[in-house]
Image: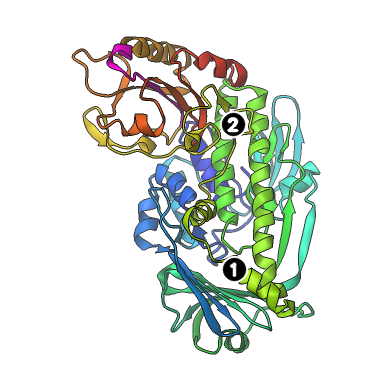
């Protein structure tokens, strides 16, 4: 792994917990203490929860529950967000440095230490391996051989440059300022503020610890050299907000430029790109770190199966097929969201009214917006890894979409929920018995699946109630209120296969049809 920031750490943890030997190098001397990324969306929190490190974030982070919109000093909208259907109904702001600290501690528990101040300076490949040349701070170079290499080394990725992969896109014409400060009189602290002004916009993002990250565009001809001065930023914020917010205790003041770029390719034979090495965009809406986290979770299980020889070439190719369109959409969406803050001074009244109306959402439109914002609606339905043999089943849980959680289940007489079985490292197959008369047949199919694919699949037989004679050597889930069967349309039996990253891979009303999927996507071990 090249890169020891959020994406690289997440990928390394996901691989190491599956028993894969991992080496992580990073050119920096340590975790960056500055608050570059701030917000974890619901989907990322679910994935971190799977690693057992989300409780700290929940307890000490700052949930995002609303927004306030101002135009020329006047508040024109205040919105409270409805919760989403997730164990984490709201995104939570938690310093990227703290997130990386949690991930690195988890990696240490798994026996892996990040090798800091170590750079990738050379890269060659053959049919079976990657040869990487590493250089430490003391000038000593080392040649390393690996089965795969993943570049998680940021926007200026050495991996991407050495692979010769283009990084097309554009740079925003406006420089930006960023301040990590305490701001007085900015309640509610669980809402972000967006100020549109004839001079330009200012956004107050939430941070944990009672702080704010304040961001906004500068004039196009601003030099953006050096670092901003707090007094200068205070004057700018006063002009654009009406002067109600007193800034203090600056932890970080900087200028930066926004780029919108997506790598031409995410893979070159045995080398891959993830996170900012593959895509960069506006920080507005906080999707950069989250997109990298999901890159890591998508790629980790595929590399694991490839290393174990239980994967087709299509499975490795699916990483780019699935993740590149997501990055492309994030780039487009963040650009669409960011640019009005730059062009507001030149908007006509009609354009300003139209822009304002875009913030008014209710009903199903608001729910759809919230799910999209929290990254819960990612759709891999067009992926070669998604296969549906029962298209009449509920569309909200069709192949390619994230699983929906269900609680009230029983496993070994203990209460549990579905997500507790979808945290990897294996695929999860649920074989639903449905009616009592189908239990024996479902039990046979579950046993056969376990026997044939047990090296990469956890198999569970789902029963509506305990039987007088329970199956031996097969894990059983009891669905006493039929909530799981109802949500997944399995009242009459069938099966669902879930990927290690929590997305539905395959479903069928027949319990004997799994081979259809395996033959197309997997190489049986």
Lateral position of residue 474 relative to residue 149, left or right: left
Magenta-colored span: 425-439
Q: Where is residue 279 in the image (x, y as percent from the top left)?
A: 68, 51
Q: Where is residue 502 in the image (x, y as percent from the top left)?
A: 47, 36
Q: Which residue is drawn at 52% across and 51% down?
A: 368
Label 1 packing within 10 angstroms: few (<14), some (14-19), many (20+): few
Q: Is tag 1's residue or tag 2's residue first in the polypeptide sequence?
A: 2
Q: Residue 295 carries which label?
A: none
The residue lying at 50 percent from left, 16 percent from top is 514
Residue 103 shown left or right of residue 263 in the figure: left
Residue at numbered disc 1: 357
Q: Write the residue at 49% across / 42% down.
A: 13
According to the picture, the residue beneath numbered tag 2 turns out to be: 303
Q: Is residue 487 visible?
A: yes
Q: Can residue 176 be seen in this view?
A: no
Front residue of 189/362: it is 362
Q: Where is residue 290 in the image (x, y as percent from the top left)?
A: 55, 52
Quadrant including the N terminus:
top right
């Amino acid at each position: 792994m090249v890169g020891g920031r959020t994406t690289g750490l997440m990928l390394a943890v996901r691989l190491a917990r599956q028993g894969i030997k991992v080496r992580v190098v990073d050119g920096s001397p340590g975790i960056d203490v500055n608050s570059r990324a701030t917000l974890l969306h619901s989907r990322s929190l679910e994935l971190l929860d799977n690693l057992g490190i989300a409780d700290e974030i929940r307890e000490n982070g700052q949930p995002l529950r609303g927004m306030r919109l101002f135009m020329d000093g006047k508040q024109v909208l205040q919105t409270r967000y409805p919760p989403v259907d997730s164990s984490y109904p709201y995104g939570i702001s938690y310093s990227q440095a703290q997130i990386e600290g949690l991930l690195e501690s988890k990696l240490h528990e798994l026996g892996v230490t990040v090798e800091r101040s170590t750079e990738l300076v050379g890269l060659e490949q053959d049919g079976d391996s990657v040869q990487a040349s590493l250089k430490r701070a003391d000038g000593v170079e080392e040649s390393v051989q690996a089965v795969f290499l993943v570049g998680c080394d940021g926007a200026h990725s050495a991996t991407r440059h050495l692979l010769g992969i283009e990084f097309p896109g554009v740079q925003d014409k406006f420089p930006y300022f960023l301040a990590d400060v305490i701001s007085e009189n900015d309640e509610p602290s669980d809402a972000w503020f967006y100020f549109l002004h004839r001079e330009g916009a200012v956004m107050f993002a939430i941070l944990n610890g009672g702080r704010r990250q304040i961001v906004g565009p500068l004039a196009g001809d601003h030099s953006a050299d050096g670092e901003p001065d707090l007094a200068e930023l205070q004057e700018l914020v006063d002009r654009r907000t009406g002067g109600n917010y007193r800034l203090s205790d600056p932890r970080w003041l900087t200028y930066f430029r926004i780029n919108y770029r997506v790598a031409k390719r995410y893979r070159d034979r045995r080398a891959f790109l993830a996170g900012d090495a593959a895509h960069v965009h506006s920080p507005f809406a906080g999707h950069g770190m989250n997109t990298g986290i999901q890159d890591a979770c998508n790629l980790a299980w595929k590399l694991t199966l490839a290393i174990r020889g239980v994967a087709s070439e299509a499975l490795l190719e699916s990483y780019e097929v699935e993740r590149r369109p997501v990055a492309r959409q994030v780039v487009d969406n963040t650009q669409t969201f960011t640019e009005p803050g730059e062009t507001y001074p030149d908007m006509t009244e009609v354009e300003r009214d139209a822009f304002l109306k875009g913030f008014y959402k209710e009903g199903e439109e608001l729910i759809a917006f919230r799910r999209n914002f929290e990254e819960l609606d990612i759709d891999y339905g067009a992926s070669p890894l998604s296969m549906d043999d029962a298209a009449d089943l509920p569309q909200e849980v069709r192949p390619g979409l994230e699983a929906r959680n269900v609680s009230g289940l029983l496993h070994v007489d203990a209460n549990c929920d579905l997500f507790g079985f979808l945290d990897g490292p294996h695929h999860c197959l649920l074989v639903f018995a449905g009616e009592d008369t189908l239990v024996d047949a479902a039990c046979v199919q579950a046993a056969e699946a376990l026997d044939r694919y047990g090296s990469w699949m956890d198999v569970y037989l789902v029963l509506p109630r305990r039987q007088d004679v329970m199956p031996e050597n097969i894990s059983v889930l009891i669905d006493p209120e039929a909530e799981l069967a109802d949500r997944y349309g399995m009242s009459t039996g069938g099966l669902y296969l879930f990927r290690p990253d929590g997305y539905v891979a395959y479903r069928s009303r027949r319990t004997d049809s799994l081979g259809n999927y395996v033959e197309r996507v997997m190489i049986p071990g």
